[in-house]
Image (tube, rainbow, N blue to C red):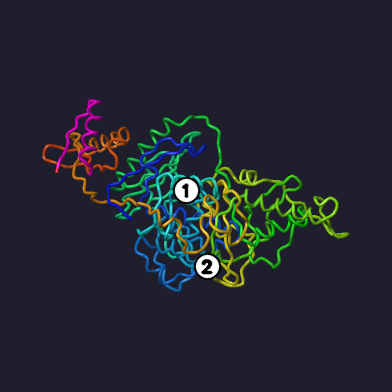
Amino acid sequence: MAVTAAPFAAYVMDARSGQEIYSQNADTPLHPASLTKMMTLYMAFTAIERGQVRLDSKFLVSQHAASQPPSRLGLRPGQRIELRYLIRAAAVKSANDAATTIGENLAGSEPKFAAQMTAMAKALGMRNSQFRNANGLTIDGHYSTARDLTILGRRLFYDFPQYYSIFSRRTADAGIATVSSTNKRFLDSYEGADGIKTGYTRAAGFNLTASAQRGPKRLIATVLGGNSTAHRNAVMAQLLDAGFGKAPSRVREVKPAPVLVATPREVRRTVQVARNEPVVQVAPAAPVAVAPSRTQPAAAASTASAQVRLSASDRPVARASNTAVVTPQAISAAVERAQLAAREKQPGDASRPQRKPGQPVARASTKGADEIAAARPAGRPEGDSPEADGLASSARPNRAPRSDESASLDRSGAASLFVLSPVAPASGMALAERAAPKAGAILLTAPGAEATDPAQPVEVVARGDNGSSYGVSLGLYRSQSEAEQLLLRTALQENSALGNAASRVLNTQRGYEANFFGMSQETAELACSRLAARQQACTILGP
Protein backbone atom coordinates (compact mmCIF):
# COMPACT_ATOMS: atom_id res chain seq x y z
CA MET A 1 0.00 0.00 0.00
CA ALA A 2 1.49 3.34 -1.00
CA VAL A 3 1.33 6.32 1.30
CA THR A 4 1.92 9.92 0.34
CA ALA A 5 4.54 12.07 2.01
CA ALA A 6 7.44 14.37 1.25
CA PRO A 7 10.20 11.86 1.93
CA PHE A 8 13.91 12.35 2.23
CA ALA A 9 16.45 9.68 3.05
CA ALA A 10 20.23 9.56 3.17
CA TYR A 11 22.93 7.07 4.05
CA VAL A 12 26.73 7.43 4.06
CA MET A 13 29.09 4.47 4.30
CA ASP A 14 32.84 4.06 4.63
CA ALA A 15 33.39 1.93 1.51
CA ARG A 16 36.56 0.37 2.89
CA SER A 17 34.88 -1.24 5.88
CA GLY A 18 31.16 -1.03 5.12
CA GLN A 19 30.63 0.92 8.34
CA GLU A 20 27.81 3.45 8.65
CA ILE A 21 28.82 7.10 8.96
CA TYR A 22 25.46 8.85 8.64
CA SER A 23 21.86 7.70 8.40
CA GLN A 24 18.52 9.44 7.94
CA ASN A 25 15.39 7.41 7.17
CA ALA A 26 17.84 4.90 5.70
CA ASP A 27 15.50 1.90 5.96
CA THR A 28 12.31 3.60 4.75
CA PRO A 29 11.02 1.89 1.57
CA LEU A 30 11.11 4.50 -1.20
CA HIS A 31 10.90 4.58 -4.97
CA PRO A 32 14.47 4.10 -6.23
CA ALA A 33 13.78 5.38 -9.78
CA SER A 34 16.77 4.76 -12.07
CA LEU A 35 19.02 3.70 -9.20
CA THR A 36 17.33 0.38 -10.04
CA LYS A 37 19.66 0.17 -13.04
CA MET A 38 22.57 -0.46 -10.67
CA MET A 39 21.07 -3.89 -9.98
CA THR A 40 20.31 -4.46 -13.67
CA LEU A 41 23.97 -3.78 -14.44
CA TYR A 42 25.12 -5.95 -11.53
CA MET A 43 23.13 -8.84 -13.01
CA ALA A 44 24.58 -8.18 -16.48
CA PHE A 45 28.15 -8.12 -15.15
CA THR A 46 27.49 -11.37 -13.29
CA ALA A 47 26.23 -13.07 -16.46
CA ILE A 48 29.29 -11.89 -18.40
CA GLU A 49 31.75 -13.12 -15.80
CA ARG A 50 30.02 -16.52 -15.63
CA GLY A 51 30.38 -16.91 -19.37
CA GLN A 52 26.63 -16.93 -20.01
CA VAL A 53 26.85 -13.99 -22.40
CA ARG A 54 29.56 -11.92 -24.03
CA LEU A 55 29.98 -8.20 -24.37
CA ASP A 56 29.55 -8.57 -28.13
CA SER A 57 26.43 -10.72 -27.78
CA LYS A 58 23.58 -9.13 -29.70
CA PHE A 59 20.39 -8.64 -27.73
CA LEU A 60 16.99 -8.56 -29.44
CA VAL A 61 14.88 -5.46 -28.76
CA SER A 62 11.21 -6.23 -28.04
CA GLN A 63 8.20 -4.01 -28.66
CA HIS A 64 7.84 -3.66 -24.90
CA ALA A 65 11.45 -2.53 -24.43
CA ALA A 66 11.34 -0.10 -27.34
CA SER A 67 8.15 1.50 -26.00
CA GLN A 68 9.63 2.50 -22.63
CA PRO A 69 9.32 6.23 -21.87
CA PRO A 70 12.37 8.54 -21.76
CA SER A 71 15.14 8.60 -20.98
CA ARG A 72 15.76 6.32 -23.99
CA LEU A 73 18.55 5.30 -26.33
CA GLY A 74 16.06 5.08 -29.22
CA LEU A 75 15.97 1.34 -29.81
CA ARG A 76 13.57 -0.10 -32.40
CA PRO A 77 11.51 -3.33 -32.14
CA GLY A 78 13.33 -6.21 -33.83
CA GLN A 79 16.69 -4.47 -33.65
CA ARG A 80 19.74 -6.40 -32.41
CA ILE A 81 22.39 -4.51 -30.48
CA GLU A 82 25.54 -5.57 -28.64
CA LEU A 83 25.33 -5.90 -24.88
CA ARG A 84 28.27 -3.51 -24.36
CA TYR A 85 26.26 -0.68 -25.92
CA LEU A 86 23.21 -1.45 -23.78
CA ILE A 87 25.38 -1.37 -20.65
CA ARG A 88 26.83 2.00 -21.62
CA ALA A 89 23.40 3.43 -22.39
CA ALA A 90 21.92 2.19 -19.11
CA ALA A 91 24.87 3.31 -16.96
CA VAL A 92 25.66 6.67 -18.57
CA LYS A 93 22.42 7.93 -20.12
CA SER A 94 20.11 5.94 -17.81
CA ALA A 95 18.22 4.68 -20.87
CA ASN A 96 15.05 2.81 -19.92
CA ASP A 97 14.77 0.93 -23.22
CA ALA A 98 18.35 -0.35 -22.86
CA ALA A 99 17.80 -1.57 -19.29
CA THR A 100 14.60 -3.40 -20.24
CA THR A 101 16.34 -5.05 -23.19
CA ILE A 102 19.10 -6.31 -20.90
CA GLY A 103 16.60 -7.82 -18.47
CA GLU A 104 14.40 -9.47 -21.10
CA ASN A 105 17.33 -11.11 -22.87
CA LEU A 106 19.05 -12.33 -19.72
CA ALA A 107 15.95 -13.95 -18.20
CA GLY A 108 13.40 -14.34 -21.00
CA SER A 109 11.02 -11.71 -19.65
CA GLU A 110 11.18 -8.62 -17.47
CA PRO A 111 9.09 -10.12 -14.61
CA LYS A 112 11.43 -13.13 -14.42
CA PHE A 113 14.44 -10.83 -14.46
CA ALA A 114 12.92 -8.70 -11.69
CA ALA A 115 12.47 -11.83 -9.57
CA GLN A 116 16.14 -12.64 -10.07
CA MET A 117 17.09 -9.07 -9.18
CA THR A 118 15.18 -9.37 -5.92
CA ALA A 119 16.82 -12.70 -5.09
CA MET A 120 20.27 -11.26 -5.79
CA ALA A 121 19.47 -8.23 -3.65
CA LYS A 122 18.69 -10.47 -0.68
CA ALA A 123 21.94 -12.36 -1.22
CA LEU A 124 23.87 -9.07 -1.22
CA GLY A 125 22.36 -8.08 2.13
CA MET A 126 19.79 -5.64 0.72
CA ARG A 127 17.08 -6.55 3.21
CA ASN A 128 14.40 -4.03 2.21
CA SER A 129 14.39 -4.09 -1.58
CA GLN A 130 12.02 -5.58 -4.10
CA PHE A 131 12.17 -5.11 -7.86
CA ARG A 132 9.39 -5.28 -10.45
CA ASN A 133 11.22 -4.01 -13.52
CA ALA A 134 14.73 -3.43 -14.85
CA ASN A 135 14.66 0.34 -15.29
CA GLY A 136 13.07 1.81 -12.14
CA LEU A 137 9.91 3.34 -13.57
CA THR A 138 7.30 3.63 -10.83
CA ILE A 139 5.23 0.48 -10.31
CA ASP A 140 3.50 -1.09 -7.31
CA GLY A 141 5.76 -3.32 -5.26
CA HIS A 142 9.00 -1.82 -6.60
CA TYR A 143 11.04 -0.25 -3.81
CA SER A 144 14.39 0.03 -2.09
CA THR A 145 16.08 2.03 0.66
CA ALA A 146 19.01 4.41 1.01
CA ARG A 147 20.95 1.80 2.95
CA ASP A 148 20.31 -0.98 0.43
CA LEU A 149 21.28 1.15 -2.57
CA THR A 150 24.50 2.18 -0.86
CA ILE A 151 25.29 -1.49 -0.24
CA LEU A 152 24.68 -2.13 -3.94
CA GLY A 153 26.97 0.74 -4.93
CA ARG A 154 29.73 -0.73 -2.79
CA ARG A 155 29.18 -4.12 -4.38
CA LEU A 156 29.61 -2.69 -7.87
CA PHE A 157 32.91 -1.13 -6.84
CA TYR A 158 34.35 -4.27 -5.20
CA ASP A 159 32.75 -7.08 -7.20
CA PHE A 160 33.31 -5.64 -10.68
CA PRO A 161 36.35 -3.31 -10.64
CA GLN A 162 36.97 -4.12 -14.31
CA TYR A 163 33.70 -2.41 -15.25
CA TYR A 164 33.34 0.17 -12.49
CA SER A 165 34.82 3.12 -14.40
CA ILE A 166 31.79 3.13 -16.72
CA PHE A 167 30.08 5.07 -13.93
CA SER A 168 32.57 7.94 -14.19
CA ARG A 169 32.22 8.40 -17.95
CA ARG A 170 30.91 11.79 -19.09
CA THR A 171 30.07 10.41 -22.54
CA ALA A 172 30.00 6.95 -24.10
CA ASP A 173 29.57 5.31 -27.48
CA ALA A 174 26.27 3.43 -27.28
CA GLY A 175 26.40 2.03 -30.80
CA ILE A 176 23.60 4.00 -32.37
CA ALA A 177 24.44 7.25 -30.59
CA THR A 178 26.95 8.95 -28.34
CA VAL A 179 25.28 9.44 -24.98
CA SER A 180 26.02 11.96 -22.22
CA SER A 181 26.06 11.27 -18.50
CA THR A 182 23.09 12.21 -16.33
CA ASN A 183 25.60 12.58 -13.47
CA LYS A 184 27.99 14.98 -15.20
CA ARG A 185 27.23 17.94 -12.93
CA PHE A 186 28.14 16.10 -9.75
CA LEU A 187 31.16 14.37 -11.26
CA ASP A 188 32.52 17.71 -12.45
CA SER A 189 31.76 19.67 -9.30
CA TYR A 190 32.77 17.34 -6.46
CA GLU A 191 36.45 16.59 -5.91
CA GLY A 192 37.17 12.86 -5.97
CA ALA A 193 33.76 11.79 -7.30
CA ASP A 194 33.86 8.85 -9.72
CA GLY A 195 30.27 7.54 -9.82
CA ILE A 196 27.73 6.15 -9.60
CA LYS A 197 24.09 6.67 -10.69
CA THR A 198 21.29 9.23 -10.74
CA GLY A 199 17.54 8.71 -10.74
CA TYR A 200 14.36 10.73 -11.02
CA THR A 201 10.63 10.15 -11.19
CA ARG A 202 7.80 12.23 -9.80
CA ALA A 203 7.13 9.64 -7.12
CA ALA A 204 10.80 9.33 -6.16
CA GLY A 205 12.13 12.84 -6.47
CA PHE A 206 15.79 13.38 -7.35
CA ASN A 207 17.97 10.43 -6.28
CA LEU A 208 21.71 9.81 -6.35
CA THR A 209 24.10 7.10 -5.24
CA ALA A 210 27.61 8.56 -5.31
CA SER A 211 31.12 7.35 -4.66
CA ALA A 212 34.14 9.55 -4.00
CA GLN A 213 37.75 9.09 -2.90
CA ARG A 214 40.06 11.53 -1.12
CA GLY A 215 43.44 10.22 -0.13
CA PRO A 216 43.03 6.80 1.49
CA LYS A 217 39.35 7.38 2.22
CA ARG A 218 36.50 6.23 -0.02
CA LEU A 219 32.85 6.95 0.77
CA ILE A 220 29.67 5.71 -0.88
CA ALA A 221 26.41 7.51 -0.16
CA THR A 222 22.80 7.66 -1.30
CA VAL A 223 20.34 10.55 -1.26
CA LEU A 224 16.66 9.87 -2.02
CA GLY A 225 13.92 12.44 -2.45
CA GLY A 226 15.82 15.57 -3.45
CA ASN A 227 13.79 18.57 -4.60
CA SER A 228 15.92 19.24 -7.69
CA THR A 229 19.19 18.20 -9.27
CA ALA A 230 20.96 21.14 -7.64
CA HIS A 231 19.41 20.43 -4.23
CA ARG A 232 20.25 16.73 -4.43
CA ASN A 233 23.85 17.41 -5.46
CA ALA A 234 24.30 20.04 -2.74
CA VAL A 235 22.99 17.66 -0.08
CA MET A 236 25.27 14.89 -1.36
CA ALA A 237 28.29 17.21 -1.33
CA GLN A 238 27.60 18.24 2.26
CA LEU A 239 27.06 14.64 3.36
CA LEU A 240 30.33 13.53 1.75
CA ASP A 241 32.25 16.51 3.16
CA ALA A 242 31.02 15.65 6.64
CA GLY A 243 31.74 11.96 6.03
CA PHE A 244 35.33 12.57 4.94
CA GLY A 245 35.81 14.62 8.09
CA LYS A 246 34.45 11.84 10.27
CA ALA A 247 35.93 8.75 8.58
CA PRO A 248 39.26 7.55 10.01
CA SER A 249 42.33 7.90 7.81
CA ARG A 250 43.44 4.38 8.54
CA VAL A 251 40.96 1.55 8.67
CA ARG A 252 41.12 -2.15 7.95
CA GLU A 253 39.63 -2.85 4.55
CA VAL A 254 36.88 -5.47 4.75
CA LYS A 255 35.79 -6.54 1.29
CA PRO A 256 32.19 -7.77 0.99
CA ALA A 257 31.80 -11.54 1.19
CA PRO A 258 31.50 -13.13 -2.25
CA VAL A 259 28.08 -14.07 -3.57
CA LEU A 260 28.39 -17.26 -5.57
CA VAL A 261 26.09 -18.28 -8.41
CA ALA A 262 25.44 -21.85 -9.54
CA THR A 263 22.89 -23.81 -11.55
CA PRO A 264 21.17 -26.90 -10.11
CA ARG A 265 23.36 -28.99 -12.43
CA GLU A 266 26.46 -27.54 -10.79
CA VAL A 267 25.02 -28.17 -7.35
CA ARG A 268 24.26 -31.80 -8.25
CA ARG A 269 27.78 -32.22 -9.62
CA THR A 270 29.24 -31.02 -6.34
CA VAL A 271 27.23 -33.55 -4.36
CA GLN A 272 28.09 -36.34 -6.84
CA VAL A 273 31.77 -35.56 -6.59
CA ALA A 274 31.56 -35.70 -2.80
CA ARG A 275 29.67 -39.00 -2.88
CA ASN A 276 32.05 -40.78 -5.28
CA GLU A 277 35.51 -39.27 -5.73
CA PRO A 278 35.83 -36.00 -3.81
CA VAL A 279 39.12 -34.87 -5.40
CA VAL A 280 38.32 -35.86 -8.99
CA GLN A 281 37.02 -33.09 -11.25
CA VAL A 282 33.99 -34.34 -13.17
CA ALA A 283 33.88 -33.40 -16.83
CA PRO A 284 30.75 -31.64 -18.12
CA ALA A 285 28.11 -33.84 -19.67
CA ALA A 286 27.99 -31.73 -22.84
CA PRO A 287 30.24 -29.08 -24.39
CA VAL A 288 29.68 -25.59 -23.04
CA ALA A 289 28.90 -23.00 -25.70
CA VAL A 290 30.84 -20.19 -24.03
CA ALA A 291 34.28 -20.50 -22.48
CA PRO A 292 34.63 -19.94 -18.73
CA SER A 293 35.43 -16.40 -17.66
CA ARG A 294 38.65 -15.13 -16.12
CA THR A 295 37.14 -15.02 -12.64
CA GLN A 296 34.70 -17.87 -12.15
CA PRO A 297 32.65 -17.92 -8.93
CA ALA A 298 33.01 -21.23 -7.12
CA ALA A 299 31.05 -22.93 -4.34
CA ALA A 300 33.62 -24.33 -1.91
CA ALA A 301 32.47 -26.96 0.60
CA SER A 302 34.98 -28.38 3.05
CA THR A 303 34.61 -31.47 5.26
CA ALA A 304 36.94 -33.36 7.56
CA SER A 305 38.02 -35.73 4.78
CA ALA A 306 38.03 -33.60 1.61
CA GLN A 307 37.41 -30.22 0.09
CA VAL A 308 35.36 -29.99 -3.08
CA ARG A 309 34.18 -27.16 -5.30
CA LEU A 310 32.02 -26.70 -8.34
CA SER A 311 33.76 -27.46 -11.60
CA ALA A 312 34.74 -24.19 -13.27
CA SER A 313 34.28 -25.78 -16.68
CA ASP A 314 30.77 -27.06 -15.98
CA ARG A 315 29.02 -23.89 -17.13
CA PRO A 316 25.81 -24.69 -18.98
CA VAL A 317 24.48 -21.83 -21.04
CA ALA A 318 20.84 -21.83 -20.07
CA ARG A 319 18.20 -19.31 -19.21
CA ALA A 320 17.69 -18.88 -15.49
CA SER A 321 13.94 -19.36 -15.33
CA ASN A 322 13.80 -20.15 -11.62
CA THR A 323 15.69 -18.24 -8.98
CA ALA A 324 16.65 -19.29 -5.48
CA VAL A 325 19.07 -18.20 -2.83
CA VAL A 326 21.01 -20.99 -1.13
CA THR A 327 23.83 -20.66 1.37
CA PRO A 328 27.32 -22.17 1.15
CA GLN A 329 26.66 -23.75 4.54
CA ALA A 330 23.76 -25.70 3.00
CA ILE A 331 26.01 -26.91 0.19
CA SER A 332 28.59 -28.02 2.74
CA ALA A 333 25.98 -29.84 4.81
CA ALA A 334 24.63 -31.66 1.76
CA VAL A 335 28.11 -32.70 0.67
CA GLU A 336 28.91 -33.99 4.15
CA ARG A 337 25.71 -36.04 4.22
CA ALA A 338 26.53 -37.49 0.79
CA GLN A 339 30.04 -38.45 1.86
CA LEU A 340 28.77 -40.04 5.06
CA ALA A 341 26.26 -42.12 3.09
CA ALA A 342 28.99 -43.24 0.68
CA ARG A 343 31.30 -44.29 3.52
CA GLU A 344 28.54 -46.32 5.17
CA LYS A 345 28.00 -48.28 1.92
CA GLN A 346 31.70 -48.93 1.16
CA PRO A 347 33.94 -51.30 3.11
CA GLY A 348 37.33 -50.02 4.19
CA ASP A 349 38.46 -46.45 4.01
CA ALA A 350 35.70 -44.63 2.17
CA SER A 351 37.48 -41.31 2.43
CA ARG A 352 40.13 -42.47 -0.04
CA PRO A 353 39.06 -41.86 -3.65
CA GLN A 354 38.87 -44.89 -5.93
CA ARG A 355 40.02 -44.67 -9.54
CA LYS A 356 40.69 -46.97 -12.45
CA PRO A 357 44.31 -47.83 -13.34
CA GLY A 358 45.86 -45.11 -15.46
CA GLN A 359 43.01 -42.67 -14.81
CA PRO A 360 44.42 -39.20 -14.05
CA VAL A 361 43.36 -37.52 -10.86
CA ALA A 362 42.52 -33.81 -11.10
CA ARG A 363 43.05 -32.24 -7.73
CA ALA A 364 40.37 -29.87 -6.57
CA SER A 365 41.63 -26.43 -5.79
CA THR A 366 41.85 -25.55 -2.13
CA LYS A 367 41.53 -21.86 -2.78
CA GLY A 368 38.44 -20.64 -0.94
CA ALA A 369 35.89 -18.12 -2.09
CA ASP A 370 37.49 -15.35 -0.04
CA GLU A 371 40.87 -15.97 -1.69
CA ILE A 372 39.27 -15.97 -5.12
CA ALA A 373 37.64 -12.62 -4.38
CA ALA A 374 40.89 -11.22 -3.00
CA ALA A 375 42.72 -12.28 -6.18
CA ARG A 376 40.64 -9.88 -8.27
CA PRO A 377 42.23 -6.56 -9.22
CA ALA A 378 41.91 -4.26 -6.24
CA GLY A 379 41.64 -1.07 -8.26
CA ARG A 380 39.61 -0.02 -11.24
CA PRO A 381 40.90 0.90 -14.70
CA GLU A 382 42.09 4.48 -14.88
CA GLY A 383 41.32 7.02 -17.57
CA ASP A 384 38.31 7.79 -19.68
CA SER A 385 39.20 5.92 -22.85
CA PRO A 386 36.74 3.44 -24.42
CA GLU A 387 38.88 0.62 -23.05
CA ALA A 388 38.90 1.93 -19.48
CA ASP A 389 35.47 0.61 -18.56
CA GLY A 390 36.22 -2.96 -19.62
CA LEU A 391 33.54 -2.82 -22.32
CA ALA A 392 35.72 -2.40 -25.42
CA SER A 393 35.56 -4.85 -28.31
CA SER A 394 38.79 -6.54 -27.28
CA ALA A 395 37.83 -6.78 -23.61
CA ARG A 396 37.14 -10.53 -23.67
CA PRO A 397 39.19 -12.20 -26.44
CA ASN A 398 39.06 -15.62 -24.76
CA ARG A 399 35.36 -16.11 -25.48
CA ALA A 400 34.38 -18.81 -27.93
CA PRO A 401 31.99 -17.54 -30.62
CA ARG A 402 28.35 -18.60 -30.49
CA SER A 403 26.72 -20.34 -33.39
CA ASP A 404 23.80 -17.91 -33.41
CA GLU A 405 23.83 -14.13 -33.54
CA SER A 406 21.33 -13.63 -30.78
CA ALA A 407 22.57 -12.10 -27.56
CA SER A 408 20.14 -13.88 -25.27
CA LEU A 409 20.89 -17.05 -23.34
CA ASP A 410 20.20 -20.46 -24.83
CA ARG A 411 16.54 -21.39 -24.30
CA SER A 412 17.11 -25.11 -25.06
CA GLY A 413 17.03 -26.22 -21.45
CA ALA A 414 15.69 -23.87 -18.80
CA ALA A 415 17.67 -24.12 -15.59
CA SER A 416 17.16 -22.79 -12.12
CA LEU A 417 19.68 -20.26 -10.89
CA PHE A 418 20.96 -20.62 -7.36
CA VAL A 419 22.57 -17.62 -5.72
CA LEU A 420 24.88 -18.83 -2.99
CA SER A 421 24.81 -16.24 -0.28
CA PRO A 422 26.82 -15.65 2.89
CA VAL A 423 23.60 -15.15 4.87
CA ALA A 424 22.92 -17.56 7.72
CA PRO A 425 21.15 -20.75 6.62
CA ALA A 426 17.89 -21.99 8.02
CA SER A 427 18.37 -25.02 10.18
CA GLY A 428 17.69 -28.34 8.48
CA MET A 429 17.43 -26.89 5.00
CA ALA A 430 17.69 -29.62 2.40
CA LEU A 431 19.69 -28.97 -0.74
CA ALA A 432 17.17 -29.57 -3.48
CA GLU A 433 16.12 -27.95 -6.72
CA ARG A 434 12.56 -27.60 -5.49
CA ALA A 435 13.21 -27.08 -1.82
CA ALA A 436 10.40 -25.48 0.14
CA PRO A 437 10.97 -21.83 1.04
CA LYS A 438 12.41 -21.32 4.50
CA ALA A 439 13.16 -18.03 6.19
CA GLY A 440 16.70 -16.81 5.71
CA ALA A 441 17.66 -19.45 3.16
CA ILE A 442 15.56 -19.68 0.00
CA LEU A 443 14.28 -16.23 -0.77
CA LEU A 444 12.71 -16.76 -4.15
CA THR A 445 11.87 -20.07 -5.80
CA ALA A 446 9.88 -19.40 -8.95
CA PRO A 447 9.55 -16.73 -11.61
CA GLY A 448 6.99 -14.14 -10.67
CA ALA A 449 6.88 -15.34 -7.07
CA GLU A 450 6.15 -12.64 -4.54
CA ALA A 451 9.29 -11.64 -2.70
CA THR A 452 7.24 -10.22 0.12
CA ASP A 453 4.68 -12.02 2.21
CA PRO A 454 1.30 -10.70 1.04
CA ALA A 455 0.10 -10.89 4.62
CA GLN A 456 2.70 -8.26 5.49
CA PRO A 457 2.31 -5.45 2.93
CA VAL A 458 5.21 -3.05 2.63
CA GLU A 459 4.51 0.66 2.85
CA VAL A 460 6.27 2.38 -0.01
CA VAL A 461 6.65 6.06 0.67
CA ALA A 462 5.99 8.34 -2.28
CA ARG A 463 6.38 12.08 -2.66
CA GLY A 464 3.34 14.31 -2.45
CA ASP A 465 1.09 16.09 0.03
CA ASN A 466 0.65 13.91 3.10
CA GLY A 467 -2.17 16.01 4.52
CA SER A 468 0.17 17.63 7.05
CA SER A 469 -0.24 21.33 6.49
CA TYR A 470 2.15 22.69 9.09
CA GLY A 471 5.70 23.90 8.57
CA VAL A 472 8.42 26.07 10.07
CA SER A 473 10.18 29.18 8.84
CA LEU A 474 13.84 29.80 9.66
CA GLY A 475 13.67 33.45 8.65
CA LEU A 476 14.60 35.70 5.72
CA TYR A 477 18.01 35.80 4.03
CA ARG A 478 19.67 38.00 1.45
CA SER A 479 20.43 35.28 -1.09
CA GLN A 480 18.87 32.00 -2.16
CA SER A 481 22.21 30.26 -1.63
CA GLU A 482 22.38 31.44 1.99
CA ALA A 483 18.87 30.17 2.67
CA GLU A 484 19.57 26.81 0.99
CA GLN A 485 22.78 26.28 2.95
CA LEU A 486 20.93 26.92 6.22
CA LEU A 487 18.24 24.40 5.27
CA LEU A 488 20.85 21.77 4.38
CA ARG A 489 22.77 22.32 7.61
CA THR A 490 19.58 22.19 9.67
CA ALA A 491 18.34 19.04 7.93
CA LEU A 492 21.59 17.26 8.78
CA GLN A 493 21.70 18.45 12.39
CA GLU A 494 18.01 17.99 13.25
CA ASN A 495 16.92 15.10 11.01
CA SER A 496 15.17 13.26 13.86
CA ALA A 497 13.07 16.29 14.79
CA LEU A 498 12.19 17.23 11.20
CA GLY A 499 11.09 13.74 10.19
CA ASN A 500 10.05 13.63 6.52
CA ALA A 501 9.65 17.38 6.14
CA ALA A 502 10.67 18.82 2.78
CA SER A 503 12.60 22.07 2.37
CA ARG A 504 12.03 25.03 0.09
CA VAL A 505 13.19 28.61 -0.39
CA LEU A 506 10.52 31.23 -1.09
CA ASN A 507 11.53 34.34 -3.03
CA THR A 508 9.60 37.15 -1.34
CA GLN A 509 9.78 40.95 -1.67
CA ARG A 510 11.59 41.11 1.68
CA GLY A 511 14.14 38.37 0.94
CA TYR A 512 14.55 34.63 0.61
CA GLU A 513 12.58 32.69 3.21
CA ALA A 514 13.94 29.28 4.34
CA ASN A 515 11.09 26.88 5.14
CA PHE A 516 10.42 23.28 6.04
CA PHE A 517 6.92 22.08 5.17
CA GLY A 518 4.72 18.97 5.13
CA MET A 519 4.76 18.57 8.92
CA SER A 520 2.17 17.83 11.56
CA GLN A 521 1.56 20.44 14.23
CA GLU A 522 3.34 18.28 16.80
CA THR A 523 6.39 17.84 14.56
CA ALA A 524 6.54 21.57 13.79
CA GLU A 525 6.41 22.45 17.49
CA LEU A 526 9.11 19.91 18.33
CA ALA A 527 11.35 21.17 15.53
CA CYS A 528 11.02 24.80 16.60
CA SER A 529 11.76 23.97 20.23
CA ARG A 530 14.92 22.10 19.18
CA LEU A 531 16.03 24.93 16.91
CA ALA A 532 15.32 27.58 19.51
CA ALA A 533 17.59 25.71 21.91
CA ARG A 534 20.38 26.25 19.39
CA GLN A 535 19.56 29.97 19.08
CA GLN A 536 18.13 29.47 15.60
CA ALA A 537 15.13 31.65 14.77
CA CYS A 538 12.05 29.53 14.04
CA THR A 539 8.39 30.33 13.42
CA ILE A 540 5.59 27.76 13.13
CA LEU A 541 3.58 28.04 9.91
CA GLY A 542 -0.01 26.85 10.31
CA PRO A 543 -2.81 26.00 7.88
318 lies above or below 473: below
How many numbered tags mark residues here? 2
The amino acid type of the residue labelled 1 equals Met
Residue 393 is one of the magenta-drawn residues: no
* View extreme (bottom): residue: 78
Q: Position of residue 336 (x, y in %)?
A: 70, 50
Q: Determine the secondary structure under disc 2.
A: strand
The residue located at (45%, 53%) in the rendering is 38
Q: Position of residue 40 (x, y in %)?
A: 47, 57
Q: Which residues are magenta?
A: 518-542
Q: Position of residue 99 (x, y in %)?
A: 44, 61
Residue 67 shown left or right of residue 117 in the figure:
left
User: In which quadrant of the rendered view does residue 256 lie?
Assistant: top right
Do the residues bearing badges 2 and 1 touch, measured as CB atoms within 8 Å?
no
* Residue with the mark numbered 1: 126
The residue located at (69%, 67%) in the rendering is 287
Q: Position of residue 488 (x, y in %)?
A: 29, 37
Q: In the image, which disc is placed on residue 347?
A: none
The amino acid type of the residue labelled 2 equals Lys
* Residue with the mark numbered 2: 58
Q: Earlier in the sequence, mark 2 or mark 1?
A: 2
Cα gap from disc 2 to disc 1, whole angstroms = 31 Å
Q: Quadrant of the C terminus?
A: top left
* View extreme (left): residue: 509
